[in-house]
Image (cartoon, helix red, strand yellow):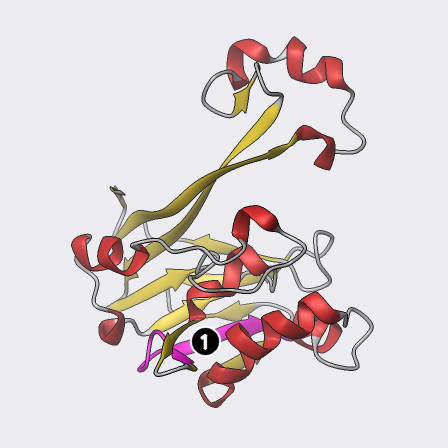
């Protein structure tokens, strides 16, 4: 499914990979009554009241601006071994068909932005071809926050088995096309990245100034 909106001189398209549900206890500091108190806003689009589960859309944003096609975050990806995240383990979605159906051939993408290096933001960086993980976007720059790369890389402070698997299938195969950044980073005249640490050390936001 794709949705498209015009924002000034830019066009932004949403391509949904899949939808999942997860337990609300993931929000450990949110009291249960907060869900009930806001049920008129949350239920049924964002929260399943009957099962007390949070509804999530795994999705990609494609920004067309300044002559560039920019993919922002790449979802979970197919065939991933994600033992700690059962809803994301070994997915098999038609995301690439959805991307092409929205008018975007992976070979025509100029820039891929990973706002941070969590499993639901880097998966379609790659796809499997003849048993090997290869870049999904062969002609793109993969722009990643350096603080996350250093933190989660093997032997970094955030290294663990699950992260090591993620690096092997979604990060290392695109290193030849990788561009690490810190502080403010400009993609084009209308598009830049700014640090927003907290969720991860390198978590970032995308700022669009296109009129």
Q: Position of residue 179 (x, y in %)?
A: 51, 81
Residue extending farthest to the bottom is 176
In depth, the one of 51 and 171 nearer the eye is 51
Residue 170 located left or right of residue 63: right
| SS assignment at label 1 | strand
Q: Is residue 71 above or below residue 150?
A: above
First to last magenta residue range: 133-146
Residue at the spot x=73%, y=62% of the render? 201
In depth, the one of 131 and 13 nearer the eye is 131
Q: Position of residue 140 (x, y in %)?
A: 35, 78
Does the rendering let one see residue 200? Answer: yes
User: Disc 1 marks which residue?
Assistant: 142
Q: Position of residue 186 (x, y in %)?
A: 47, 70
Q: Is residue 73 above or below residue 6?
A: below
Residue at the spot x=44%, y=70% of the render? 125
In depth, the one of 61 and 83 nearer the eye is 83
Q: Position of residue 94 (x, y in %)?
A: 29, 54
């Amino acid at each position: 499914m794709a949705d498209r909106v015009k924002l000034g001189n830019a066009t932004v398209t949403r391509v949904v990979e899949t939808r999942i549900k997860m337990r609300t206890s993931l929000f450990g500091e949110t009291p249960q009554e907060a869900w009930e108190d806001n049920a008129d806003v949350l239920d049924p689009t964002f929260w399943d009241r009957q099962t007390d589960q949070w509804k999530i859309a795994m999705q990609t944003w494609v920004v067309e601006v300044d002559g560039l096609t920019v993919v922002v975050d790449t979802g979970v990806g197919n065939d991933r071994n994600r033992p700690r995240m059962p809803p994301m383990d070994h997915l098999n979605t038609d995301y690439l068909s959805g991307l092409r159906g929205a008018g975007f051939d992976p070979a025509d993408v100029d820039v891929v932005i990973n706002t941070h290096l969590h499993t639901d933001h880097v998966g379609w960086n790659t796809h499997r071809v003849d048993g090997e993980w290869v870049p999904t976007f062969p002609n793109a720059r993969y722009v990643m926050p350096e603080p996350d790369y250093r933190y989660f890389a093997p032997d970094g402070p955030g290294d663990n088995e699950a992260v090591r698997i993620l690096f092997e299938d979604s990060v290392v195969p695109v290193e030849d096309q990788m561009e690490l950044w810190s502080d403010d980073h400009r993609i084009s005249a209308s598009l830049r990245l700014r640090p927003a640490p907290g969720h991860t050390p390198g978590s970032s936001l995308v700022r669009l100034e296109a009129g």
